[in-house]
Image (cartoon, rainbow, N blue to C red):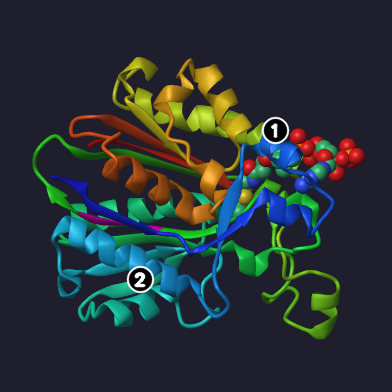
Amino acid sequence: MRSRILGTGSYAPKQVLTNADLETMVETSDSWIVERTGIRERRVAAPGEACSDLGVLAAQQALADANVQASQLDLIVVATCTGDSPLPSTASLIQHRLGAVKAAACDISAACCGFVYGLSVADAYVRTGYRYVLVIGAEVMSSIIDWTDRNTCVLFGDGAGAAVVGPTEDDHGILSLHLHSDGRLSDLICVPGGGSRIPPSERMVIDRLPFIKMRGNETFKIAVKTMEDAVREATSAHGFGIDDVDWLVPHQANVRILKAVGQRLRLPLERIAVNLTRYGNTSAASIPLALDEAVKNGTIQTGHVVVMAAFGSGLTWASGIMRW
Ligand code: ACO
C-alpha cells in the first residue's frame, strides 16, 4: 500500500502588489525585478488576514476535490513559517474552523521545503493505517518582510495550497520522498528576532530583527545545486531518467534558478511548472499552489510522473516523486 494525493486546493489573497507598486516603496525597478527574478506581481494578505484564513480556504477546496469530509480527517499538518501566532499551532486553528473533530493537528517548520516535509509525514502515517491526512502549505510572508529592504521585499508573496492524502493500492501515488538539511548554513536565510534567542522587544523591532534576512547570491548558487541533486535523487530511486519526468513542480523562488536547474538536468522549461511570475516566492505554499494550478488546468494528467523539488531556510532541501 502507498499514499496518494486525492485532491488539491489553493488560495491567494485578492490584493495584488505589482513591481510598479514596489517602485514607489523602495529604490527598485520593474525591469530589475523581472530580469533578476522573473516576478511581475505577488499577492498580499489584507490587514487582519492571517495564515489560517488562507489555509482554511485552500483546505476546503482540497477536501471538496478529494470528496472527503473534514470529519473524516485523521491528521492535519500545516507547513508554515508565518503561522497566526507561536501558540497554538495554526493546524489546531484550522482543525477547528474545518470541523475536523477527530483529527490530530500540528505545524511543521521547514521553510520553503515545508510542504514536501509535510507530505512525508502524511505518507508515513497513511502507510501505517491513517485514512486521510490533510497537508497545507500556507504563508503570510508579508508579515515578516522588511518593506524598506529592497533585497528581500520584492521577492515574496502570500498564499496557500493544500492536498488531501489517502491510501491507494494501485501503482499511482507517492513513490518516494527525500528530505535533507544542513544547519551549518542556517544564517543564509533567517528571521533573527522574535523567538527565544532574541525575544520580542521594542529594541529588536527598531533593529528590524523580526524580519527576513537573506544572503541572496550565496543562496542562489546552493539552490541550483541542491535542486538538481534532489531531482536526480528522486528519479534514480526508481530507475527513472530525466526523460521519464513529465512535470517538475519546483519551489518557486526565482525563474533564473529554475532555468539553471532545467539546463543542468537537460529538462526543458516547458516541462517545469512556473507560476512565480504572478505569486513571487510563497515559501511553503509555493509547491502546492503550483501543483493545484497545474492539476486544475489539465497540465498534469493521470499517469504523469511528477517530481517536486524544494530548497529553503535551514538550509533544507527535499524532493518527491509521484505517479499522478
Ligand atoms: N532592485 C534593484 N537593485 C537591487 C534589488 C532590487 N530589488 N535588490 C538588490 N539589488 C542590487 C543589490 O544591492 C546589488 O547592488 P550592488 O552590486 O550595487 O551591491 C545588485 O542588485 C546585485 O545584487 P545581488 O544580490 O548580487 O543580485 P542577484 O543577481 O544575486 O539577485 C536575488 C538577487 C534575486 C535575491 C537572487 O540572488 C536570488 O533569487 N537568490 C535566491 C533567493 C532564494 O531563492 N531564496 C529562497 C529561500 S526563501 C525561504 O527559505 C523563505
Q: Are marks 1 and 2 in contact (CB under 8 Å)?
A: no
Residue type (three-letter) at the residue carrying disc 1: Glu
Kindly indicate the quadrant of the structure image that contains residue 98.
bottom left
Question: Which quarter of the rendering shows the N terminus?
Answer: top left
Secondary element type, mark 2: helix
Left or right: 174 in relation to 260? left
The answer to which of 249 and 45 lies nearer the viewer is: 45
What residue did someone put label 1 on?
35
- Examine the residues drawn in magenta and state their main secondary structure: strand
Q: Where residue 193 sits in the image (x, y, percent)? A: 73, 71
Which residue in the protein does label 2 denote?
Answer: 56
Q: Callout 2, which amino acid?
A: Val
Residue 212 at x, y = what percent? 70, 60
Q: Which residue is located at x 13 percent, y 60 percent? A: 67
- Nearer-the-camera pick, 308 or 302: 302
The magenta segment: 161-165
